């Protein structure tokens, strides 16, 4: 309503209220002229156009137009005073209305502000308010030829645009029920607009009104076939599929195949599987951070647990690698794929909006998300569902302690028996002293054991004794633990190059330090300030390139890590 209490409505039957009370409209000619001018308030409308709009097929004369103008001015002055004005300009007339007294003006201002709003809640409020200005067809749909007028068609198009935007943000926020009435009304006025009809179907389905959603699809399908002779669009068919409660497309199963020779890790599997199986005290999603040194089997553990627990997550298992060519993957791109695979169309542009939509789509569902090779906690946060019943397995060299509520699972080397078993499964090596020695020379590292096993499989004449003899030479060990596609050296190199410059220098000093050392010994070796060296050593611990020191404050580096540090020191 305008600031002076004037309320003029054209988005529906033409009505006027002043001071909260209805105003009786003028006679037919002046009323028709008033409605025609209100389609473009503040703009000059030519006499020829006014004659077409106000008198339709009967087409009045200029004399009739002048009489209608006189009556309209008199009527306006009787209740509006200076709030409304009708002036002649050139070869036409302009109607001016003070403030936002016309619902058409309020609608357009609300639509513009809503589309520009960054905050989803504010966007929904503005768009709902704008769409609420509509009470029916423009000027009540009279005369009938009005629907073909360009100004009316532009208004109807803006109504569809507003309804579509409202439907999208309501779905993103999980507030579909609030948007159903205004979007439904707009869809009745645009019966052949399939994108809007598809959105209405999705809104109904999101509210659990599946029968109504399916019925709406059938109405649109019949209308398109009877009136236009065409079939429904892919967008409407996708909305139909999503609305069928018992016939939805199969949920995504994206986790890579399980590791057929997965060995050991019973304690770690139990540490993750136990909480997943427990149904009590679940206030949010379970998030597990699996950390460990390069090649320790983080990804294999996550994939193995995901397959063992797949039955707990019937609504889907999503998978993404968060590192590509050593660089972090944009979480917005991961969300784009996740939402697409969950059946979403028309995705929002920003990371925040996609994350909100992802939380809405996973709410009330049981979905497992596996994220491999995370670089930072900030990269992971947008990819975490918001509700209980879902779970996330994250792997990374850092502990990802910045994730709220994360349960950390830190992997160490395989136990000797498990290492011998893995070596036998991969390379066909029988248990024995030679196999035990190979496991020890590999440091119990699964990646190294797989490389060793594959080397034995490719060279059966070498035997475990021959391989152990070759690996005893520290200068040949990293080279001996490499086959096409599997190389310990490459994994360690990737971890080294991801370190900040200061930590790289400290890492290289591991080559001259003993297997176990204190921070003071490291400070002497590198010639650095003790506090800075301690900080750097802790960063190497976080990167899983040093073992966590005990109460004695002694740091330890695995033999393979020290061998690579020696190589890197010679190269860099």
Image (cartoon, rainbow, N blue to C red):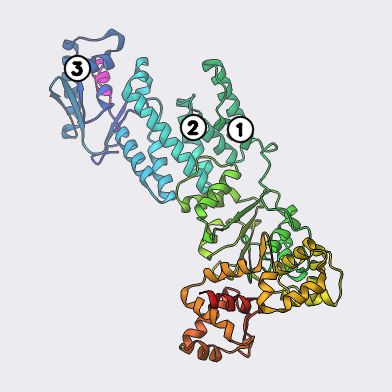
Residue at image location 54% in from the left, 83% down from the top? 509
Residue 524 drawn in magenta: no
Q: Dividing the picture into quarters, in which one does residue 273 lie? A: bottom right
On-image quarter of the N terminus: top left
Disc 3 secondary structure class? helix
Q: Earlier in the sequence, mark 2 or mark 3?
A: 3
Q: Which mark is residue 196?
A: 2
Q: Which mark is residue 240?
A: 1
- Contact? badges 2 and 3 (CB < 8 Å): no
Principal secondary structure, stretch drawn in magenta: helix
Please identify, in this view, whether the residue under mark 2 or under mark 3 is nearer the observer.
2
- Label 2 to label 3, Cα distance in Å? 36 Å
Q: Which mark is residue 189?
A: none
Residue in the foreground of this view, choosing between 18 and 119: 119
Q: Which mark is residue 47?
A: 3
Task: Give coordinates of residue 469: x percent, y percent.
Answer: 77, 76
Q: Earlier in the sequence, mark 1 or mark 2?
A: 2
């Amino acid at each position: 309503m305008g600031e002076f209490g004037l309320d003029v409505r054209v988005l529906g039957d033409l009505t006027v209220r002043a001071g909260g009370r209805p105003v009786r409209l003028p006679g037919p000619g002046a009323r028709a002229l008033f409605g025609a001018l209100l389609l473009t308030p503040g703009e000059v409308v030519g006499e020829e156009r006014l004659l077409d709009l106000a008198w339709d097929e009967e087409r009045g004369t200029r004399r009739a137009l002048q009489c209608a103008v006189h009556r309209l001015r008199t009527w306006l002055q009787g209740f509006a005073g200076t709030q409304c004005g009708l002036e002649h300009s050139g070869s036409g007339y302009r109607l001016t209305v003070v403030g936002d007294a016309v619902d058409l003006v309020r609608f357009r201002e609300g639509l513009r502000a809503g589309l520009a709003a960054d905050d989803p809640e504010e966007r929904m409020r503005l768009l709902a308010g704008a769409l609420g200005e509509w009470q029916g067809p423009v000027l009540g749909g009279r005369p009938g030829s009005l629907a073909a007028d360009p100004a009316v068609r532009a208004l109807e198009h803006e109504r569809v645009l507003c309804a579509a935007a409202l439907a999208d943000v309501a779905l993103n926020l999980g507030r579909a029920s609030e948007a159903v009435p205004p979007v439904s009304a707009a869809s009745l006025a645009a019966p052949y607009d399939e994108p809007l009809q598809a959105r209405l179907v999705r809104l109904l389905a999101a509210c659990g009104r599946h029968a109504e959603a399916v019925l709406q699809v059938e109405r649109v399908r019949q209308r398109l076939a009877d009136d236009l002779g065409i079939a429904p669009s892919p967008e409407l068919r996708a909305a139909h599929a999503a609305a069928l409660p018992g016939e939805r497309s199969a949920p995504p199963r994206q986790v890579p195949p399980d590791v057929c020779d997965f060995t050991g890790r019973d304690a770690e599997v139990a540490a993750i599987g136990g909480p997943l199986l427990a149904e009590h005290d679940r206030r949010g999603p379970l998030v597990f951070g699996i950390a460990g040194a390069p090649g320790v089997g983080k990804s294999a553990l996550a994939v193995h647990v995901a397959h063992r627990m797949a039955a707990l997550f019937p609504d889907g298992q999503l998978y993404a690698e968060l590192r590509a060519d050593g660089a972090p993957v944009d979480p917005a791109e991961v969300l784009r794929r996740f939402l697409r695979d969950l059946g979403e169309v028309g995705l929002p542009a920003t990371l925040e909006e996609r994350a909100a939509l992802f939380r809405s789509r996973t709410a009330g569902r049981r979905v497992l998300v596996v994220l491999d090779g995370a670089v930072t906690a900030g990269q992971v946060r947008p990819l975490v569902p918001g509700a209980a019943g879902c779970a996330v397995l994250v792997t990374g060299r850092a502990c990802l302690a910045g994730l709220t509520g994360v349960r950390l699972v830190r992997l160490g080397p395989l136990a000797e028996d498990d290492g011998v078993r893995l070596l036998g499964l991969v390379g066909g090596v029988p248990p024995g002293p030679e196999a035990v020695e190979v496991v020890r020379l590999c440091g119990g590292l699964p990646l190294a054991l797989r490389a060793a096993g594959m080397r034995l499989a490719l060279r059966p004449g070498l035997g475990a004794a021959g391989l152990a003899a070759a690996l005893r030479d520290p200068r040949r060990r990293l080279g001996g633990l490499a086959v096409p596609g599997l190389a310990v050296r490459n994994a360690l190199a990737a971890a080294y190059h991801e370190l900040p410059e200061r930590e790289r220098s400290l890492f290289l000093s591991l080559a001259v330090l003993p297997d176990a050392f204190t921070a003071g010994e490291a400070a002497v070796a590198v010639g650095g300030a003790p506090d800075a060296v301690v900080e750097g050593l802790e960063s190497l611990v976080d990167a899983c390139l040093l073992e966590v020191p005990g109460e004695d404050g002694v740091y330890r580096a695995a033999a393979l890590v020290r061998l690579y540090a020696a190589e890197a020191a010679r190269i860099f």
